[in-house]
Amino acid sequence: MMEPREKYVNVFTDFGFKKLFGEKPSKPLLLDFLNELLIEQEGPIKNITYLNTEHLGSSPLDRRAIFDIYCENEKGEKFIVELQKAKQSYFKDRTLFYATFPIQEQAKQNDWDFKLKAVYTVAILDFVFEEDKSDIHKYRYDVKLTDIETCKVFYDKLTFIYLELPKFKKKIDELSTNFEKWLFVLKNLHKLNKIPDQLKEERFEKLFAIAEVAHFTREELKSYEDSKKFYRDIKNSMDTAFEEGKVEGKEEGLKQGELKGLKKGRIEGLKEGKKTMIVEIIQKGVSNNMSVETLTQITGLTEKEVLDIISTL
């Protein structure tokens, strides 16, 4: 029996993200989103131009940089917009790596004085960074080069913005800004069956029209179904990550290998149904002489909870 098809595209598929933000008809939507995201620090962006998303460098490492969306505004400032569906090791490193390409592209011959245009990297995340999970109300992170002592921005032309959408919990009648409306749409579009009254304005009416699956061509529909299957596969793979991590840890051997496997395999939150998994983690940790502090970091439990489990072993 076929699963019911949603009315609107899932933004967290590659196809859906490009459909809403990466095609010529949807350029006004991307412009509006970037303005809502950056208006306070950037000022109004009047126009954007799509750039080649594949970096055609001379080395294989260069060619690994393929952006989801890459564009520039009328001032020559560059914007990378990335969608990340599942946790990835060193994702912050990846965004930093990607930001180096718009910087290198600005290099000029002869008497160039090294003056650069600003580079913005926007990461829309369908997961929460492990180190941020306890801060349940903060879903937006604006990062610049900052002096540690004064907390003042030292260099303002390199900006990273991370949006952890799982933390955004507001319901439709709680939205107070256009930016919050954008976050709500990005997170919930594929769950809706009509445009909510609170979103009946030109920008979102255009978005809902573009996102309606019934309007897709046969080729678009096939591409979307393929993209959706890939998205589901990634989500489902998270359920087996713990076991995979455990195997990897055993292969690496001894304490460090086991720790790496456990860290990789630990699914965010370690949900209620995985209590036996937590006990096994702690049991293996104790046998490898791991500290209580380390076990709290791995499991996400409090020190008291970890000690309570250890007392039962």
Image: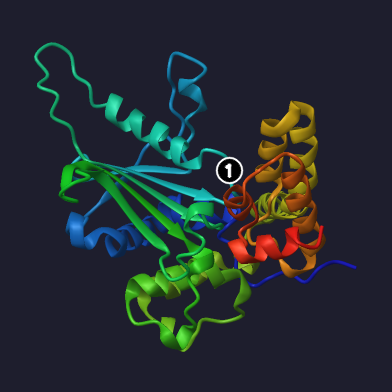
Residue type at the position of mark 1 = Gln
- Most extreme residue toward the top is 110
Circle 1 residues within 10 Å: few <14, some 14–19, many ≥20:
few
Q: What residue do we see at 36% from left, 57% from top?
A: 141
The residue tagged 1 is 88
Give the total number of marks visible in the rendering: 1
Q: From the image, which quarter does the N terminus lie in?
A: bottom right
Q: What residue do we see at 13% from left, 29% from top?
A: 115
Residue in front for this viewpoint, 101 or 163: 163
Q: What residue do we see at 68% from left, 56% from top?
A: 221
Residue 31 position within the rendered picture, expressed as x and y whole percent measured from the top left: 32, 57
Residue in front for this viewpoint, 61 or 197: 61
Residue 19 position within the rendered picture, expressed as x and y whole percent measured from the top left: 52, 55
Residue 278 relative to residue 49: left or right: right
Residue 67 position within the rendered picture, expressed as x and y whole percent measured from the top left: 46, 38
Residue 5 position within the rendered picture, expressed as x and y whole percent measured from the top left: 73, 69
Q: What residue do we see at 45% from left, 36% from top?
A: 93
